[in-house]
Every structure is written in structure tokens, then in C-alpha cells.
Amino acid sequence: MDIRADRDRPVRAPDGPIARLDRVFARPRRALGEIAVFAGPALDARPTPGDSFWWMDYDDGRYLVRTGDPIEATPLSADAMIAEIERRAVRAQRWHRENARASG
């Protein structure tokens, strides 16, 4: 779900972005969680920048949820979830290596 096309419409309209988000997110969830990837050591307060995403399970399947502007919810298979974790881990490793070189 992508609400970019709704930017100029009234937010509380019956078919506006809030109603569309409610149709997706107000349904009963079976499970939800956040997966976060951090570069470098982070033993307690996560001192390094991280990257995360939310997943939500509904009766019709699992969704990857990207928060921000716009909020997006897309179907997420097990293979796609693994690929998303790997993509973020590679990005975190790259960030850590580049910053280690810059500070070293």
C-alpha cells in the first residue's frame, strides 16, 4: 500500500489515507515485530546507527511495513524477508568499514 497519491486529499475522508491505513493496520494481527541491524559492537544502548524494519502477520499473510512518509505495507514472503535482512546487514557492514577507515 502506498499513499503518495493521496497527499492532496483530505486526511479524514472516507476513502482518504487514514481510512486506507485503518483498513490494513486495524485488522487483528497474528504477530508483529521489528528486525534491526546495527554496525559494529553494540552491547547495550546501541551506540552505532542502525537500520530496521517492521513485519506484521495477518490472516492473509506477512507484510513488510516501512514507516515514514509515506507509510508502505507490502506482502513479504520468507525469502523476501531473508533478502531484506541480508540487504540491511550488507549496508551496515559497509557503513562500519567506511567509518572505521575514516577514524583510523
Image: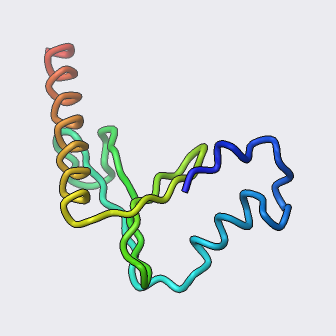
- Quadrant for residue 15, please give it: bottom right
Which residue appears at 66% of the width and 71% of the height?
Answer: 22
Q: In this view, does 89 lie above or below 85?
A: above
Where residue 75 appears, x then y in whole percent?
39, 63
Left-right relation of 66 to 43: right
Left-right relation of 25 to 79: right
Left-right relation of 82 to 21: left
Which residue appears at 18% of the width and 28% of the height?
Answer: 94
Q: State which quarter of the image contains the N terminus.
A: bottom right
Q: State which quarter of the image contains the C terminus.
A: top left
Closer to the camera, 29 or 23? 23
Q: Is residue 50 above or below residue 64?
A: above
Where residue 18 appears, x then y in whole percent?
73, 62
Q: Is residue 4 above or below residue 85?
A: above
Where residue 88 appears, x then y in whole percent?
25, 43
Which residue appears at 19% of the width and 30% of the height?
Answer: 96
- Quadrant for residue 23, please give it: bottom right
Where residue 91 appears, x then y in whole percent?
23, 35
Which residue appears at 18% of the width and 57% of the height?
Answer: 82
Left-right relation of 50 to 26: left
Q: Is residue 63 above or below residue 38?
A: below
Q: How has the structure been colored for display?
A: rainbow
